[in-house]
Amino acid sequence: RTERVVLFLFLRVASAMARAIAAGAVLAAAGRLELGLALKGVVDFQSKLGGGVAIQATYQDAEGQITVAAGKSGNQSATAEDTFLFGSATKTFTATAIMRAYKAGKLDLNATVSTYVDPLLMKGANQTLVEMYGPNATNMTVWHLVSMQSGIPDFDVTTFDTLMLTTAKTHSWTPLEILQYGAKQPWICMPGECVYY
């Protein structure tokens, strides 16, 4: 029952977003209100299950942007101006882009990650991936990364999350800085020897 209610509320949010998108900029305020009410329904339901939930959603097109927020984290209410970590949701975009490049013949899934990132790392950090992450990275392939089998250290730890969130208004963390932080964390396993999400 709980899963069905959550799915219903999620579909309500998606439907409100679709209507707001279809309505365009003329009805942006009405779309924002409808989306906000749908989000509030999701958050209210989740709060009854226990635990704090804060949600923020943004739709942007050539005409403008709609951002809504609902819920609480601790005692703080979520606002449209808050900074949220997007986290694992980026994996779907990254994997899709990688598989498109593979399908187009522009990328080899069995090539080492170093093949593709070393030119960028040398330019930005004057280091190769293996120099940054150590010998465990030597045989790490693109497929290992996409299939969650790389064993690469996880930068998504509480201390770094807190640092990124507390400095978000004054510092924009670059991908290189995030890679360098991750390189300081312990490896999960050797590439191909585990699956770690």
Image (cartoon, grey):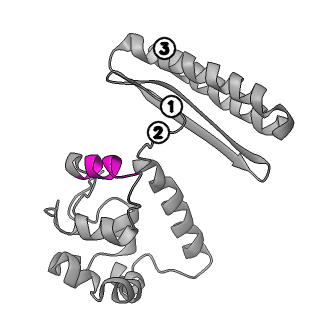
Q: Which residue is mark 1?
A: 79
- Position of 13 with respect to 124 (left or right) is right
Measuring 47% from the left and 39% from the top, which residue is drawn there?
A: 82
The boundaries of the magenta stretch are 160-168
Secondary structure of residue under mark 1: loop
What residue type is disc 1 on? Thr
Measuring 16% from the left and 67% from the top, which residue is drawn there?
A: 184
**Residue 37: percent from left, percent from top:** 63, 19
Q: Is residue 16 magenta?
A: no
Judge by depth and name the residue closer to the eye, 96 or 176.
Answer: 176
Measuring 78% from the left and 53% from the top, which residue is drawn there?
A: 62
Secondary structure of residue under mark 3: helix
- Position of 68 with respect to 161 (left or right) is right
* Rendered position, 121 above or below 38: below
In space, the residues marked 2 and 1 are separated at their CA atoms by 5 Å
Badge 1 density bin: few <14, some 14–19, many ≥20, Cα 10 Å: some
What residue type is disc 2 on? Asp
Q: Residue furthest left?
A: 186
Q: Are marks 2 and 1 in contact (CB under 8 Å)?
A: yes
Among the two numbered marks 3 and 2 on one chain, the one whose residue lies closer to the N terminus: 3
Q: Which residue is mark 3?
A: 44
Judge by depth and name the residue closer to the eye, 68 or 3.
Answer: 68
Q: Are marks 1 and 3 in contact (CB under 8 Å)?
A: no
Judge by depth and name the residue closer to the eye, 109 or 78.
Answer: 78
> Can you see residue 4?
no
- Which is more foreground, mark 3 or mark 2? 2
**Residue 18: percent from left, percent from top:** 74, 35
In space, the residues marked 3 and 2 are separated at their CA atoms by 19 Å
**Residue 54: percent from left, percent from top:** 44, 28
Corner quadrant of residue 72? top left
Q: Which residue is mark 2?
A: 82
* Rendered position, 31 above or below 131: above
